[in-house]
Structures are given as structure tokens and as C-alpha cells.
Image (cartoon, grey):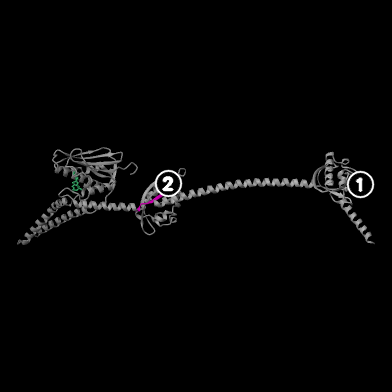
Amino acid sequence: MGSSDRRQTQQAEERHLLTHIIAHIPSGVFWKDRDFRYLGCNEAFARSAGVARPDDIVGKTDYELAWEKEQADYFRTCDRRVMEEDRPLLNIEEVERQADGRQAILLTSKVPLHAADGQVCGVLGIDTDISELKRVEAELRQIRSELESRVRERTADLARANETLQGEVAERKRAEEALRVSQEQYRLVSELTSDYAYAFHADADGFCRVEWVTGAFTRITGHDASQLAGRGGWTQIVHPDDLPVVERRGQGLFAGRTMVTEFRIVGRDGRIWWLRDHARPIWHEAEHRTVRILGAAQDITERKQAEEESQRHQAALAHVARLSTMGELSAQLAHELNQPLCTIVGNAQTAQRLLSSASLDREELREALGDIVSAGKHAGEVIRRLRAFLREQQPQFVMLNVERVVEEVADFIEADARQHGRRVRFAVAPDLPVVRGDPIQLQQVLLNLVRNGLEAMREASEAAGELIVHVRRRDESNEVVIGVSDTGAGLPGENTETIFEPFFTTKAAGLGLGLSISRSIVEAHGGRLWAESNEGPGATFLFTVPAIRKGDE
Ligand code: ADP
């Protein structure tokens, strides 16, 4: 076979292949001449154009086929542009009604066809039905937009949740800060007041369990709060002498009463701590019993020590006061001792006489010696009483009726006044409130003021003047005021305070201690002692003692 034959065969094969491809590709393929008449098409295009076979389309224009006029117009416009401009028109997307009446979306590309001389001789078109593609695409778009809107919603949800969370976080931070501040304040208050607080849970059988105890407890006592758990745990650390107080406290609490008690506890290191405990029971009406106990305790060790110190101080002052009356006492003492001494001397002389006589009367001698022994014993008794008087004594605070306190020394006062050639008058108001104090000490103060008044009156010329002891209540300050008014010489100097200084005296035999001791006694009772000049002659000395309010007893 010659080369031209071979070329012919090859060309024939290529044409066959091309025809085959054109016939079977899923797109429609067509070609037209310059006058827009179809020269041919493939099966797919023939179907859409509404002709039975591809050959049936030859010589026809778009106006003679299945399309509507507007569509045919559009095809022509496109064909014309391709051929006139000699340029392909690619990917024209158009909606086209098919021969079978179906609306299809087609993607069409048209290219110019050239004759052997290169002149444009027609147009070749290829269209692909992209309806399905478009549908899927639309569906995808729809899905995508749904997805997007869902994402947007979700994002908004998340944003809202985040906002709420942020708010909650901020709120929690604020709450934590508030808690921290309040804990800090609580710790500070607790530490500054050296208080500790606690809560106990009480069982029906009186068994107490610690719910909580604040940390200061350990700091104060050195004991671990867990030691308090269980029956008797608490009493282990109470000072044995104060167990009855704690026992009464427990009874009160279980009977539903709030209890304020002061007692000692023994710290881990053996130190003694004074506590003021304020405990409140929580009463369960239905069970008719105390179910919880809330309390707070304060370390009052220092206060107690100061109190003890002041009591010691008091006792020392009272001791000095007694010594100052020693001068007066010595006369009485001499008188009391004189009698037994006389007896002793007299009997001793008798004994001497009996011994030097020729006939010894043993019975008489025994009697004389017996008298000496009992007189000696009597003298010993006098000395013992004096010692007891001079011995320091702690003040004894008790509930007092001031009227009684005054009454008990009224006789002494009257006798004293008589001795000084003066009269004394008592003006005691009725209905005086109860006070707390040491009766002996308060009487000592009163006697001292009376004695001073009488002494001041001794020097004064006013012979008719009287001494008044007056007692009244002062409701606005809730106290009792006791006063001694004289018609004496009046206070020495302008300053009414100088006379209260220890060792200040204007008397030849004075010690100058009476007023300063009296003042410290009155102050230990929570009262005041001061002096005022009278309108007329003389001075008035006044002292107060706080009254006990109902319920404080
Ligand atoms: P003493 O009586 O030993 O002097 P006091 O402390 O009792 O000591 O009194 C101090 C001073 O106060 C007295 O020396 C006297 O000058 C003055 N004084 C006390 N009471 C009166 C009074 N009723 N009138 C005038 N002066 C008084």
C-alpha cells in the first residue's frame, strides 16, 4: 500500500472515530452554514431539536425546529457574532425548552468553521445539559446556606453562652473577692479581739459534738479543737476549781437559757487562761430540747490579772489605813492589856509574898499562879485580835442595801459626833437600789468622811452647825450618791483635788492618807469620790456607787 493510500485509510479511520465520538458523547453537537442552516448534528442534538434522526435537520433553520421564536432569535444572534467576529463564544448558559417540553439549562459553546481558504463558512456548536448539575449545585448552595445559617446560629448560641459564662465568671470572682474580704475581716476581728467562736451539735442524750471552732481557739489554748469531740472532752481542759461553773453553764444551756460564764482553762503548756464564754442554745420546739449551741469566748486573762492586782492593791491600802488607826488603837490596846498585866503583876507579888512567908499556903499559891496564867491568856487573845485586824484582807464584794450599810455604822457616827460635841442628821432616801460592794470598805470610807467633817467642825466657831449624812439615788446615771456635809472650816485652798493626794494633810497629827485610800476604794467599786465647797460654811464630800440593774444580778 502506497503512502497516499495509507494516508487515505488513516483519514478514513480518523473520520470514523470522530463520527463515533460525535454520535455518542452526551452533549449535543451541531454545525451550520453561513446562512444559519443546519448542515448536521448528532443524535443527542436531534432529540432536543425535536427531529427523529440527525439527517432530518439538514437544511433547516432554528425557526423550523422545536424552539420558540425568542430562543431561535437568540441562537441566531450568537451564531452571527461568532461568524462575524471569527471568534469562539464559550460557555453560554441558557434556559431552553426542549422538544419534549422539558425546561433545560444548557451550557453552549460555539466556534467559527473555516473553509480551505480560511474564510468563515459556518458555525459549530456543542451544548451540554447542565440541568442536573445546576440542580445539584442549587441543592448544594441551599445546604451550604443552611449550614452557614446553622453555623451562624450556633456561633450566636456560643457567643451568648460565652457571654453568660463571662458574666458568671465575673460574678464568681466578685463573690470570691467578697468572701475573701469577709474572711479577712473575720480573721482580723477574731484575732484582734482574741475571740474564738464555736458551734456544738447536741444529741438527745446530752452528748455534744463539735461542729466547728475557729482557729483562734488553738492560738489561745494551744489545744486542738478535735480534743473537744465527745463527752467530757471539753471539761478535760477546764480548771478543776471551775468545773462547777461549767457544769451549771451546761445545765442552763440544756434548759434553753443563754449563759454568760467566766471560768479558767488550762492551756497545753499548763498556763491558766481566763475565758468569758457567751453561749446561746438553739431550742427545738417539737423535740423540746436544745439541739445546737452557738458560742463565743473571749480571753479575759489580762483583765482578771488586773483585777487581782487591783484587789491586792486595795488590800495593801486598807492595811495602811488600819495602820494609820494604830495610833488610836494603841490607847485602847494599852487599856485592854493594862487589866491582865495588873492581874499578872498583882498575883506575882502575892506569890512572892507567899513564898517568903514561914508557912507556905500551897493552895493560895496555886490560885495566884492560875490567875497569872489566865491573865496571860487573855493578853494573848487581845494581841491575836489586833493581829487579825492588822492582817491584810481581800475585799468581799456582795449585793448590798446602802441603807443597811449606813445604819450599821450610824451608832459609831453618833458616838463620834457626841464626843466632838456636835449633832449629826441622817437623810436617807427610800427605795434605794441594790449595789455591789464590800460593806466594811464602804463603811470605812463613810466613817473617814464623817471623822474629817467632825474634825473640820472642831476648828470652826459655828457651834450650832450640824453634820448631815445624806443618801439618794440618781436615776439618770443609775447610781447611789452618798454625801457628808459639814459646817466646818471649809476646804483648804482653791484646788479641791489636792486634798486627795496621799500624805496631804493640814493636821498636826494627820497622815494625809484617809482621802486617797477612800478614793481608791470607791473607784474599785466603779464609783467616784469628790469634794465641793458649801454655799454656806463647810464642805461636802460625795461618793457614788453604781446601782445593779434588774437582771444584772
Ligand atoms: P488627814 O485627815 O490625815 O489629814 P485626809 O486624807 O483624810 O488625811 O485629809 C487630807 C486633808 O484634807 C486634811 O488634812 C484636810 O486639810 C482636808 N480635809 C479633809 N476633810 C475635810 C473637811 N471635811 N473640811 C475641810 N478640809 C478637809
Across and down, in percent, residue 292 comes to 45, 48
Q: CA distance from mark 2 to mark 1?
A: 115 Å
**Which residue was labeled with disc 2?**
281
Name which residue type carries label 1: Asp
Give the left or right position of residue 113, taking residue 438 as reference.
Answer: right
Residue range highlighted in magenta:
288-301
Give the left or right position of residue 184, taking residue 154 as reference.
Answer: left
* Mark 2 touches mark 1? (CB < 8 Å): no
Q: Which residue occupies the extreme left position in the image?
A: 358
The residue closer to the viewer here, 117 or 172, is 117
Residue 215, visible in the rendered structure: yes
Residue found at x 85% / y 51%: 25
Query: In the image, is residue 367 above or below residue 89?
Result: below
Residue 455 appears in which quarter of the rendering?
A: top left
Across and down, in percent, residue 172 comes to 53, 48
Q: Is 106 contained in the magenta span?
A: no
**SS of the residue under disc 2:** strand
**SS of the residue under disc 1:** helix
Residue depth check, mark 2 versus mark 1: number of the one nearer the observer: 1
